[in-house]
Image (cartoon, grey):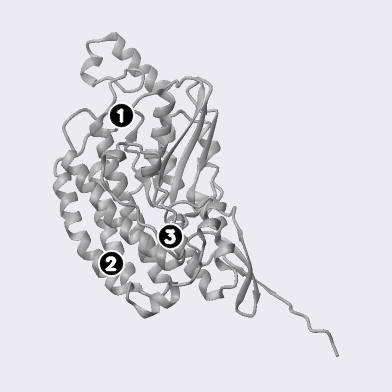
């Protein structure tokens, strides 16, 4: 009797596959329809942003973070400027911190809306995709009103902000936040009790809390597995310790729990922004330090010292003291941190970005083991990766 053999089939998925949400290649090892091995292959989008940042001044580098993770651009800017401010030993004025917080939470809502819309269209629910982008467009309109740009803003500055908020900002944000709960309820009505959505996500791409911690996962991927870790609570920055908000967690660690966590996070972000709008008091939006901030233009015609500071800042930039820092924020995908080494010159010696997408992607083989090929699309959507955040 001939010996029975069990051969596996290796299937290439990507790097140009619409459901991989970017240029990601997956090598799937299959026994029939069942996945017995999955190997993410990255490197197709390597942009070298970290090395680029080591060749430019600290101020010039503000343009890079939004291009690393392009769905929550204000949060990216916030992470970088907080790291440089930590290096300098300065803190932005209270009004600037409040404005940063408002824009960061609106960015979180905008990013989660992209997750929701793309995850829905991956499962052929195209109406939710269009509704989510309708709401996201309103947030981008607000961002354009503030910074002049819809995505790559360059609005945050080391020590504060480029300029103050425009007139009409607060009522426009309040109007958006007033409509948001009704729209979130609509999305839940379309998905949460949708039989197809639940059968495609419940018990799919399961990640235990131990595995999530072992792979260094953060954000909704970790919280969906039941671990209540959030940088805003664990290591408060930018005044988050003064705001009341909850950290939603899941119980089973599947794709459905990650969906529920993000839905609740949008509601909590709305709650934070409403508190911040109530606290938004008048005041400067840039630190009063001539070594960091450009002097007012009116002083340039009266003070030679102001002219010298202006010339030095524009031509050379700032000179942080020698040392190394790590500053982290809670991005929509998890912990985003900047590690910067300074030798006292006007350019960083080393920049290293800790991205949540990279760590979360590592756990994909665990999520997919003994799943089916159809579950791959669900798993990738549920971890909400940005490939620019993985391939730097």
Q: Residue at x 47, y 62 (%)?
A: 21
Disc marking residue 331: none
Q: Quadrant of residue 188?
A: bottom left
Label 1, on which residue?
Answer: 92
Q: Nearer the viewer, residue 144 or 342?
A: 342
Residue 279 seen:
yes
Task: Determine the secondary structure under disc 1.
Answer: loop
Say whether residue 117 is left or right of residue 211: left
Question: Percent x, y for residue 254?
Answer: 46, 66
Q: Residues within 10 Å of mark 2 (few under 14, many from 20)?
A: some
Report the Cα–Cα distance between label 3 and label 1. Answer: 33 Å
Comes first in the chain, label 1 or label 2 = 1
Say whether residue 257 is left or right of residue 93: right
Disc marking residue 224: 3
Task: Determine the secondary structure under disc 3.
Answer: helix
Label 2, on which residue?
Answer: 131
Q: Residue at x 20, y 38 (%)?
A: 165
Q: Nearer the viewer, residue 323 or 60?
A: 323
Q: Nearer the viewer, mark 2 or mark 3?
A: 3
Comes first in the chain, label 3 or label 1 = 1
Q: Is residue 283 above or below residue 131?
A: above
Q: Residues within 10 Å of mark 3 (few under 14, many from 20)?
A: many
Question: Percent x, y for residue 389?
Answer: 49, 49
Q: Nearer the viewer, residue 234 or 256?
A: 234
Q: Residue at x 39, y 58 (%)?
A: 249
Task: Determine the secondary structure under disc 2.
Answer: helix
Q: Is residue 65 above or below residue 22?
A: above
Say whether residue 335 is left or right of residue 361: left
Question: Percent x, y for residue 213?
Answer: 53, 52
> Mark 1 and 2 residues: CB-CB less than 8 Å, in contact?
no
Q: Residues within 10 Å of mark 1 (few under 14, many from 20)?
A: many
> Mark 2 and 3 residues: CB-CB less than 8 Å, in contact?
no
């Amino acid at each position: 009797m001939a010996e029975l053999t069990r051969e596996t089939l290796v299937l290439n998925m990507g790097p140009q596959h619409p459901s991989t949400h970017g240029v990601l290649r997956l090598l799937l090892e299959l026994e029939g329809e069942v996945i017995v091995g999955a190997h993410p292959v990255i490197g197709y989008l390597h942009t070298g942003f970290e090395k680029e940042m080591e060749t430019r001044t600290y101020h010039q580098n503000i343009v890079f973070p939004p291009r690393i993770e392009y769905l929550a651009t204000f949060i990216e800017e916030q992470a970088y400027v907080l790291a440089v401010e930590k290096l300098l030993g300065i803190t932005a004025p209270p009004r600037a911190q409040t404005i940063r917080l408002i824009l960061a939470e609106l960015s979180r809502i905008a990013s989660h809306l992209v997750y929701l819309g793309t995850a829905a269209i991956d499962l052929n629910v195209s109406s939710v995709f269009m509704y989510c982008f309708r709401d996201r467009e309103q947030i981008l309109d607000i961002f354009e009103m503030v910074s002049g740009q819809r995505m790559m803003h360059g609005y945050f500055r080391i020590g504060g902000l480029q300029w103050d908020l425009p007139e009409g900002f607060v009522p426009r944000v309040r109007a958006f936040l007033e409509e948001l709960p009704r729209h979130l309820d609509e999305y839940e009505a379309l998905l949460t009790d949708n039989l197809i959505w639940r059968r495609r996500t419940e018990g799919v791409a399961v990640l235990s809390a131990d595995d999530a911690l072992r792979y260094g996962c953060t954000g909704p991927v970790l919280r969906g597995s039941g671990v209540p870790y959030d940088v805003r609570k664990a290591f408060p920055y930018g005044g988050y310790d003064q705001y009341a908000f909850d950290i939603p967690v899941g119980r089973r660690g599947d794709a459905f729990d990650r969906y529920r966590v993000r839905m609740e996070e949008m509601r909590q972000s709305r709650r934070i922004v409403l508190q911040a709008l109530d606290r938004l008091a008048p005041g400067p939006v840039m630190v009063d330090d001539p070594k960091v901030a450009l002097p007012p233009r009116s002083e340039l015609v009266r003070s030679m010292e102001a002219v010298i500071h202006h010339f030095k800042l524009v031509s050379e930039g700032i000179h942080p003291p020698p040392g190394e820092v790590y500053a982290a924020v809670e991005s929509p995908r998890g912990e985003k941190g900047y590690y910067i080494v300074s030798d006292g010159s006007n350019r960083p010696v080393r920049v290293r970005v800790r991205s949540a997408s990279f760590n979360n992607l590592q756990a994909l083989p665990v999520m997919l083991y003994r799943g089916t090929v159809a579950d791959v699309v669900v798993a990738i959507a549920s971890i909400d990766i940005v490939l620019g955040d993985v391939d730097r």
